[in-house]
Image: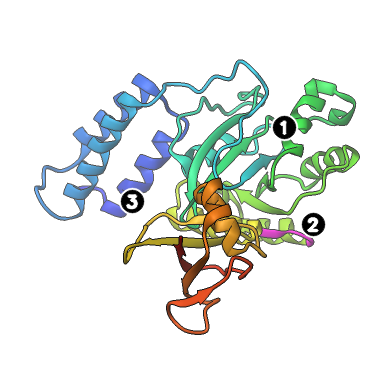
Amino acid sequence: MPMPHRTFVQVAKRRLVGTVGSERVRILRALVDELPDYRSGPYADIRKWLNDEIDQTRVRAKVIHRDTIAVRREGAAQVAFVGPPNAGKSSLLQALSQIQIKTGDYAFTTTRPVAAVTRIGGVRVQLIEIPGLLEGAAEDRGGGRALLGVLRNADAIVYCHVASASPGVLTSVQNEIKAAGIELPALLAATQVDEAEEGDVERVAAAFHDLDVVSVSVLDDSSLERLREAVWRLLGLLRVYLRYEGDVEDEPLAFRPGATVEDVAHAIHHELATSFHAARIWGPSARFDGQRVGRAHIVADGDVVEIVP
């Protein structure tokens, strides 16, 4: 009798965590060979998923390398994954973005910041893994000052902490960030909850009661989605959709609260921002659909805006 399909997916994900390049392809092919030869149903869906992963792995960069510690900003916001060595940062970044990163069950696998762009809340957000910060990082131990410099430019922090680990290892990281004078919106991802014991997450939440704690496992897609939602709330961005000749674009623009119609026009083109006369609004900030507003009108999350030249 074949393994239950849900169990098979979980086993497959566990075997694939941290694998790259030819090794990942080898494991994927072995998993395909282990599947029962059904042409429809859940096992056929799993076969398609595995074959798609093989195709994607062949075109991805095998390992992400960084020759410089500087990170060029991309997307609507930048979120830093921070924590002690071996806290699951690389695996989490990989699971959220589908980027291939060299990972390992030992400290300091990642030695330079690694960036990836993914979609959170429908907009492009840049995630950056900051290598494990050591005690004394603020005094440049382990090249800490350069790493803290990268962190200083971020918009928010996701602290990564293994759910079963002692809270003290993360507290020392927080102390270094505080010593560097960095204050950013933050939440805590309690990682590897699939291996945690009862009460572990509650102890983490009690130790870091000032942070929103999100339980997450790279093997559980629903927990990854909850983390995405928590990051979106943390960023506090709002989405505005553009309308042209009756058609609404699928991809929204992202703005900080308080953004105006003029800001929306500027995001389209700086010359448009100086020349347009008004806009029409559909959505939460409009009193009625298609309301005509001026350039100082403040937009809200979910608004649809049509610029009137």
Q: Which residue is mark 1?
A: 150
What numbered label is drawn on residue 273? none
Identity of the residue drawn at 84% across and 29% down: 137
In front here: 272 or 69? 272
| 118 in the magenta segment | no
Region of the chain picked out in magenta, as a range:
209-213
- Residue type beneath disc 3: Thr
Identity of the residue drawn at 82% across and 26% down: 145
Identity of the residue drawn at 47% across and 49% down: 119
Q: Which residue is mark 3?
A: 7
In front here: 275 or 64? 275
x and y percent of residue 69 in the render?
67, 22
x and y percent of residue 15 in the render?
40, 35
| 212 in the magenta segment | yes
- Residue type beneath disc 1: Val
Residue 41 in which image quadrant: bottom left
x and y percent of residue 286 in the render?
52, 79
Dot 2 or dot 3, earlier in sequence = 3
State yes or no: discs 3 and 1 in contact (Cβ < 8 Å). Answer: no
Q: Which residue is mark 2?
A: 207
